[in-house]
Amino acid sequence: MLINADFTRRVVVEPGQYEWSASPQAGVERMMLDRIGEEQARATSIVRYAPDSHFPPHAHPGGEEILVLSGTFSDETGDFPAGCYLRNPPGTSHQPFSIEGALIFVKLRQMAADDRRVVRIDTRTASAWQRHEDRMICPLFSSPEEQVCLQRVEAGRPILVDAAAGAELLVLEGRIVDGDRRYQSGAWLRLPAGDGLGFTAGEKGARFYLKISSPSA
């Protein structure tokens, strides 16, 4: 299965384009954003857990990255409400579930093989955020292959300050403006190197997930 598998082209998926598909587990649905492979795939998705839904124990040989968007996502390591960021490195396993239901942003099989860092960050905590010139940044992960963070940018300010490498954004709050286009909360954008320098935050600012990949990643 190939979904948005050409990483040299800009891809935009807006909330009105979401098409939910069933996962192998009842009560868990996926909106596939990009995918290379079948059930065991390199994939980026938004996953929706119905209340009282669960997955059986399973491993992540290529790692798993999660940002909880709403509700509460859980596994045997704890309960993670909206705003929590998790990284489970290659070789880890877990048994996820949700009692109240949850919406999560998930990236699978996209970590370096030697990555061993387990990450748990509550981005709702004020101390997780840092001022960097004209924006607030919540660092999530950094390596030679990728830089991952949340950012809050005030109205009219540029979203990307450097487009030398490829970028991936998920709008969490507010809007991102690209000429006459307005990307609202829930919009996902994957940009090739050199793209996106004209993006600005909308009239109420913007909060977004940002992943910058190195050219070799």
Image (tube, rainbow, N blue to C red):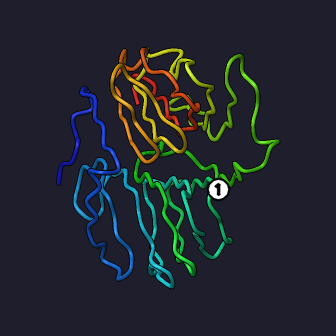
Q: Does 45 sit left or right of 126 as displayed?
A: left
Q: Residue at x 68, y 55 (%)?
A: 120
Q: Residue at x 25, y 59 (%)?
A: 19
- Is residue 207 or residue 78 the one in the foreground? 207
- Is residue 170 or residue 202 the one in the foreground? 202
Position of residue 155 measured from the top left corner of the image (x, y, whole percent): 58, 24
Q: Residue at x 24, y 49 (%)?
A: 36
- Is residue 117 or residue 210 the one in the foreground? 210
Residue under circle 1?
84
Position of residue 172 measured from the top left corner of the image (x, y, whole percent): 53, 45
Q: Quadrant of the C terminus?
A: top left
Q: Label 1: few (<14), some or many (≥20) within 10 Å?
A: many
Residue furthest to the right: 127
Please tell me in which quadrant of the rendered image residue 71 appears: bottom right
Q: Quadrant of the N terminus?
A: bottom left
Vertical placement of residue 107 versus 202, above or below: below
